[in-house]
């Protein structure tokens, strides 16, 4: 029976972890600076936004002093960053509510939607990608290419409207919009509201991943040790499971991580179509209302989720492939 030469697993070092966590912290610091400056350099005075155009100059000046806007920029940034590190994002410029109380309820709906869409995308992409890679140029490859092209070409808002029309208006199987927590409607109610948005985002994500899965598998299938395994008489299914999928795992995991980050930060359209109370919809509403302090928090949280998922994927590389060296 054919076996690959054994690879000695390289241990994860403390130095690598410290260095990687340091790079994550630098990225988040850079995002913090950019989001802070975004609010500072937008046209209009935040104090004037809060009080309205009818407010007197004296009232505006008093509020600016109370909000700390009369302090030097670096002092304002230090105060804001210190608050963020303690979980305090400040208050909304429009409503005066604590931003944490506005943003926190939006995190889980967006995370649940992104993870569900990613799962649906994988259910679409992995079987079709494998089928396409096994026989390049064959009927299954053409079918996978057609599905991929179709999924990428369809606008997600159009797909969302079509799904609502079919499953909500015509068949009346699923709710057309809104969100229901597990506490409110049980698991069935929560999943029923989640399904259509997740399918809408998942189809597009899956269509993108089909090509990457196919490409990653084809690169490994053409290697000598896979040909040798086949020459030894191993079944195609065994060769795929033991030798191809395992060695193509890193590029596939990479695109999965990128897709997850894209879904978390890019499901704005789906959240709007389905009136889904997520971070993307909150960021858009904050932009339209010129409530940039909430937009600031939403962007920073998205960056945190992206950085953490990227960090975890890097750690996963070593578990998937012993040849990966941390250093």
Image (cartoon, rainbow, N blue to C red):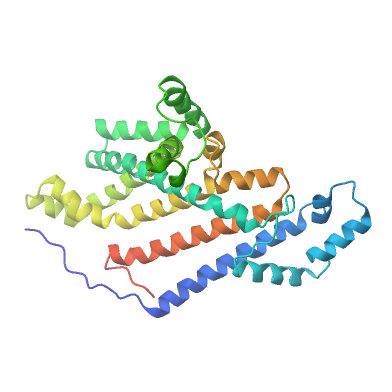
The picture quadrant where one finds residue 131 is top left
Q: Residue furthest top?
A: 170
Q: How many marks?
A: 0
Taking 164 as reference, is 282 above or below it? Answer: below
Position of the C terminus by quadrant: bottom left
- Image point (61%, 46%), residue name: 282
Query: In this orientation, does residue 237 appear?
Result: yes
User: Of 190 and 202, which appears nearest the observer?
Assistant: 190
Q: Is residue 17 above or below residue 316?
A: below
Residue drawn where x is 87% and y is 46% of the image = 53
Q: Position of residue 27 (x, y in %)?
A: 56, 66
Examine the rendered structure and indicate whether residue 80 appears above or below residue 267: below
Looking at the image, residue 260 lies above or below residue 90: above
Q: Residue at x 39, y 27 (%)?
A: 173
**Residue 314 picture location, percent across and down:** 39, 64
Q: What percent of the width, then of the height, locates residue 2? A: 9, 59
In the visual, does 206 lie left or right of 64?
left
Residue 256 falls left or right of residue 54: left
Indicate the position of residue 98 as horizontal and vertical percent values: 67, 57
Q: In the drawing, does residue 3 fall left or right of residue 108?
A: left
Q: Quadrant of the N terminus?
A: bottom left
Instruction: Tell me, yes or no, if residue 208 can be seen here.
Output: no
């Amino acid at each position: 029976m054919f076996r690959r030469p054994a690879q000695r697993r390289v241990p994860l070092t403390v130095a690598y972890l410290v260095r990687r966590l340091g790079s994550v912290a630098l990225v988040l610091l850079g995002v913090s600076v950019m989001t802070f400056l975004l609010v500072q350099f937008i046209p209009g005075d935040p104090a004037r936004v809060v009080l309205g155009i009818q407010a007197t100059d004296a009232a505006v000046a008093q509020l600016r002093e109370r909000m700390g806007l009369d302090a030097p920029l670096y002092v304002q940034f230090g105060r804001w960053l210190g608050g963020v590190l303690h979980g305090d994002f400040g208050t909304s410029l429009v409503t005066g509510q604590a931003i944490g109380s506005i943003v926190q309820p939006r995190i889980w709906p967006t995370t649940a939607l992104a993870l569900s869409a990613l799962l649906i995308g994988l259910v679409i992409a992995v079987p079709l990608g494998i089928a396409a890679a096994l026989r390049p140029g064959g009927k299954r490859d053409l079918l996978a290419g057609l599905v991929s092209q179709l999924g990428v070409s369809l606008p997600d808002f159009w797909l969302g409207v079509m799904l609502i029309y079919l499953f909500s208006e015509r068949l009346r199987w699923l709710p057309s919009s809104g969100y229901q927590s597990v506490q409110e409607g049980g698991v069935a109610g929560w999943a029923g509201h989640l399904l259509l948005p997740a399918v809408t985002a998942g189809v597009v994500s899956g269509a993108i991943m089909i090509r990457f899965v196919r490409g990653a598998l084809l690169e490994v299938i053409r290697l000598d040790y896979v040909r040798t395994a086949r020459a030894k008489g191993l079944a195609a299914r065994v060769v795929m499971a033991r030798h191809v999928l395992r060695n193509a795992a890193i590029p596939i995991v990479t695109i999965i991580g990128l897709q997850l980050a894209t879904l978390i930060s890019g499901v704005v359209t789906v959240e709007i179509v389905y009136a889904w109370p997520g971070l993307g919809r909150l960021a858009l509403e904050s932009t339209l209302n010129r409530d940039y302090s909430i937009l600031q928090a939403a962007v920073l949280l998205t960056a945190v989720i992206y950085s953490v998922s990227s960090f975890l994927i890097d750690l996963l590389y070593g578990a998937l492939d012993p040849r990966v060296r941390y250093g």
